[in-house]
Image: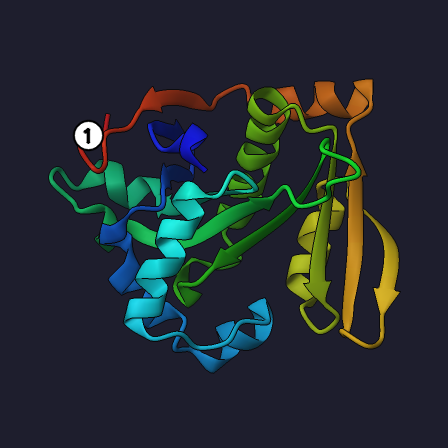
Amino acid sequence: MRLNQNTLLLGKKVVLVPYTSKHVPRYHEWMKSEELQRLTASEPLSLEQEYAMQRSWREDADKCTFIVLDAEKWQAQPGATEESCMVGDVNLFLTNLEDPTLGEIEVMIAEPSCRGKGLGTEAVLMMLSYGVTRLDLTKFEAKIGQGNEPSIRMFQKLHFEQVAVSSVFQEVTLRLTMSESEHHWLLEQTSHVEEKPYRDGSAEPC
């Protein structure tokens, strides 16, 4: 969506930046992985199809995506390109026409060496906060493959509760409703996050 095209979110472990065309080649290389295709229930795309997909992410009002950068690497190396710091992505789908306050969230940490270090957790927290404060969302769902135990555990630690299991799609659905106490908890978890202007890669590490 265009709403976040000029937004950079700076956390402790990750930096979230809009998905632009310069990120596509690295993303395309990631998605050649059969493991990632399985975990994300994705089909392999050609590079041209990946560029078209990136354009749709930017234009479509019902999709919001950020590329996840390794904050330590991004800040420690002056002049480091975003592409060299990419570790994954985090997405929100606003596709429930009956309930515009519901967003489906997903996260992918594509770089194996960056998994299990809390990057995905912080990326999800930052996206939840963005969804609440910028998109007026009050409920979130995550659909995760039944075999993806690390992701299921991560969302459960973030107060998501399992609400459905699909044997057909072999996935579980977890949900988080933003009650007053959950909203307060989320604000506490993301109080360190800074929102900065982004101009297609011109933002510099602090």
- Camera sees residue 11: no
> x%, y% of residue 42?
53, 71
| Residue 139 sits in quarter | top right
For residue 93, above or below residue 46: above
Q: Quadrant of residue 84?
A: bottom left
Say whether residue 153 is left or right of residue 117: right
Q: Position of residue 4 (x, y in %)?
A: 42, 31
| Residue 2 vertical placement versus 175 (above, below) | above
Colour setup of the view: rainbow
- Amino acid at dot 1: Glu
Residue at image position (64%, 25%) is 132
The location of residue 203, given as percent across then percent down, is 22, 29
User: Can residue 69 be seen?
Assistant: yes
- Would you say 148 lies left or right of 191 here? right
Q: Quadrant of residue 50?
A: bottom left
- From what the image shows, is residue 206 above or below residue 143? above
Q: Which residue is mark 1?
A: 204
Q: Going by the picture, which residue comes out furthest to the bottom?
A: 34
Residue under the point 34% across and 40% down: 71
Element type at mark 1: loop
Seen at 33% across and 28% down, the residue is 6
Report how many numbered discs are placed on residues in the image. Answer: 1
Which residue is at 74% across, 28% downward? 138
